[in-house]
Image (cartoon, coloured by chain):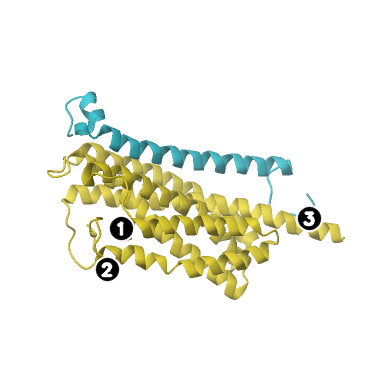
Chain colours: A yellow, B cyan
Amino acid sequence: MNWFKYASPPAFYPLAGKMAPWFLAAAVLLGAIGLYIGLFAAPTDFQQGDSYRIIFIHVPAAWMSMLIYVVMAFWAGIGLAFNTRLSSMMAHALAPTGAMMTFIALWTGALWGKPTWGTWWVWDARLTSELILLFLYIGYMSLAAAIDDPRKADKASAVLALVGVVNVPIIYFSVQWWNTLHQGASVSITRSPSMAAIMLWGMLVMVFAFWSYCIGAVLVRVRHIILERERHAAWVGEARG
Amino acid sequence: MQWNSAAEFFAMGGYGMYVWGAYGVSALLIAAELVILIRRGRTLRETSGRSPRPDDRNP
């Protein structure tokens, strides 16, 4: 099977159309299981009471916000380096969902911060760098929308995406590098998680639900972008005769 | 099951406003994104008058 075939928009368009419903269905199923574990099965936390249940959306959204940015910068960079149409379209399709995930992470974080820290917001490293991530997404989308020529828009926004990627490790390691109010990672690949098993499971299932949702939504959006851009190209070809 | 009644569930041990504020806004945003995606897809299909294909040269 030649995977490069799917690098061309006309070939990728039907493939994305076939895959998107499966990812969205998986998101619904995993979301239902995750919410059941998070809201019904998992016990009340002995320190934070039931306010901790915000973790089941806060952590998946925060992870997605960073992951989507890295993937977006990757595709934007590929588009910039190899001038491949679909890569840039993919980057543009990822941005709105990534921005939404960043906003959800900030919003749920504020609602979790108030009962646990006594404040909605502090200018500590973790929160500030996550806010910068939101501005990077907004800046990327605004820049791409502000330039009429799609190829120029792809290039300019790709540079912004690539420069901004430096912020992602800053977000991730901020709780280690600086003395922050935000707690350290509860889940890490280098040591066993500091959470009860049922809470951890609920969170992981929600992570996969968010993951599936993001992939499904982005595939639907990339189809729209393909349609808009390729139709324009066809129209130009027709006008030229 | 951690709850004895629906009221207890919605109260969330006194943190109802925070927990439901977080879940509610997240659900609203995701629903809004889906609605926007569905509408945009519908508009794109309607403007072409039939199921469109990207490689169409003579619509």
Q: Closer to the camera: disc 2 or disc 1? A: 1
Image position, residue A72 (x, y; %):
49, 62
Q: Closer to the camera: disc 3 or disc 2? A: 2
Q: Amino acid at mark 3?
A: Trp
Mark 3 closeness class: few <14, some 14–19, many ≥20 residues within 10 Å? some
Image position, residue A49 (x, y; %):
17, 40
| Contact flag, marks 3 and 2 (Cβ < 8 Å) | no
Judging from the image, mark 1 belongs to the subunit labelled: A
Query: Looking at the image, which residue sits at the far right?
Result: A241
Mark 2 closeness class: few <14, some 14–19, many ≥20 residues within 10 Å? few
Query: Looking at the image, which residue sits at the far left?
Result: A46
Residue designated by label 1: A124
User: Which circle's residue, 2 or 1, is located before the other in the chain?
Assistant: 1
Query: Looking at the image, which residue sits at the far bottom?
Result: A81
User: Which circle's residue, 3 or 2, is located before the other in the chain?
Assistant: 2
Q: Amino acid at mark 1?
A: Asp
Residue designated by label 2: A177
Q: Closer to the camera: disc 3 or disc 1? A: 1
Residue for point 58% across, 69% down? A79
Observer-nearest of B5 and A3: B5
Do the residues at pointers 2 and 1 share their chain?
yes
User: Which circle's residue, 3 or 1, is located before the other in the chain?
Assistant: 1
Q: Amino acid at mark 2?
A: Trp
Say which element carries label 1.
loop
Residue designated by label 3: A235
Query: Splitting the image into 4 quarters, where does residue A181 fall?
Result: bottom left
Judging from the image, mark 3 belongs to the subunit labelled: A
C-alpha distance separating marks 2 and 1? 11 Å
Inspect this view and state whether residue A1 appears: no
